[in-house]
Image (tube, coloured by chain):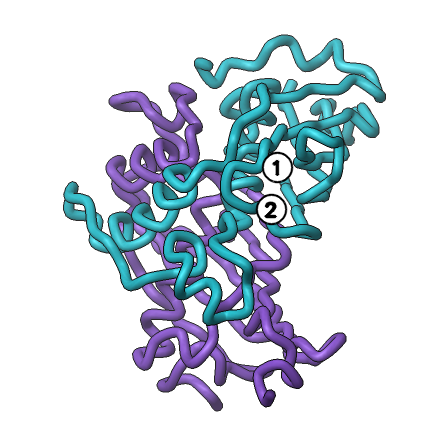
Amino acid sequence: MTGQPMNPITLEPGTEFRTRPRAMTRERMRWYVDAQPTIAADDGRVHTQPPTIHDDDEYARSQGLPGIIADGMISTNWIQGLLVDVFGAQFACRSRLQTKYIAPIYEDQIVTACARVATATRNENGASVYTLEVWCEDDTSKKLTVGSAMVELPV
Amino acid sequence: MATGGVVTDLDVGDVLGPVEFTLSPFVVREYSHAVEMHHECFQSANELFMPPTLIHLDKLRLYNHACPGGTGPTARIHYEYDAEVLAPVRPGDRLSVSGEVKERYTKKGREYVLIEMQLKRVSDGELLVRYFDRVILAYKTRDEQAA
């Protein structure tokens, strides 16, 4: 993906987008865990942190969980990635994304990020403004993460 | 004021930060790579933008600043993310992040905390990103923790 929009001006309410299904593997969960101290250090090297509920089964069970679960921000980022596929870099310039994690995502659960255009309008400046329903679902269509998004595309 | 301790002690009215930092290209690319956003605007050698979701790690920056004792006795569960980008953020920008605990309440035996955060450009004070973050302080309910 280049971050260039596909042709968002033609989008109609009801238009739906989906990522490919992805398994929420142990590695995907750990990538996000490792990213946190790595980014905090910001020294170009990989850093790790103490066990979390996202990468250590024993610690997760000590917290009352059946095993590791995915950090909610992974599903939010998969939704965001889909929105950047559709709207390009403008999503990083003027947008809003709201997500709520309504069900845990367990190891190897299949996850697809989805978005559906709710409204397409123009604001007082002539910019196109899209609102969308967004969600992640598993391979039984059970919703795991739900929310909404807005993106403003300048003239 | 519950700052200066652990994250699970934070309470309504607690102010986190401000903390200043300069956004680096490494941080943009590394974060985007970790969540498989391979778009040029997040991964290229130049012309990068901050992924809006990166604001979430600024919360950890604030936690580290305000709560040197760490997480506390229980692991947080992230419940809700709500970020609005008002203007783009680019690597090289000198930024200031601040937060305030707006709510702390119990629902169905679990404690929730809502933090409002603002990310501003230091040079002119422009508000770039507004973020609301809601967490559950422990997966186990109070009764389960007491048992």
The percent coordinates of residue A126 (x first, y second) are: 73, 23
The percent coordinates of residue B104 (x first, y second) are: 64, 79
Residue at mark 2: chain: B
Closer to the camera in the image, A130 or A33: A33
Q: Residue A147, which numbered label?
A: none
Seen at 37% across and 77% down, the residue is B66
Closer to the camera in the image, A126 or B101: B101
Q: Is residue A145 above or below residue B12?
A: above
Q: Toward which corner of the image does residue B51 lie, by quadrant?
A: top left
Residue bearing mark 2: B84
Of the chain colours in the picture, the one used for chain B is purple
Q: Toward which corner of the image does residue A141 lie, by quadrant?
A: top right
- Tell me the amino acid under the disc marked 1: Ser
Tell me which chain appears cyan.
Answer: A
Crowdedness near tag 2: few (<14), some (14–19) or many (≥20) residues, C-alpha within 10 Å: many
Q: Secondary structure at mark 2?
A: strand
Residue bearing mark 1: A95
Seen at 15% across and 43% down, the residue is A45
Seen at 57% across and 14% down, the residue is A5
Q: Toward which corner of the image does residue A114 lie, by quadrant?
A: top right
Asked if labels 2 and 1 touch by Cβ distance under 8 angstroms, the answer is: yes
Closer to the camera in the image, A33 or A42: A33
Q: Secondary structure at mark 1?
A: strand
The percent coordinates of residue A123 (x first, y second) are: 77, 30
- Tell me the amino acid under the disc marked 2: Glu
The percent coordinates of residue A145 (x first, y second) are: 67, 44
Closer to the camera in the image, A110 or B94: A110
Residue at mark 1: chain: A
- Viewed as shown, does residue A14 lie left or right of A142? right
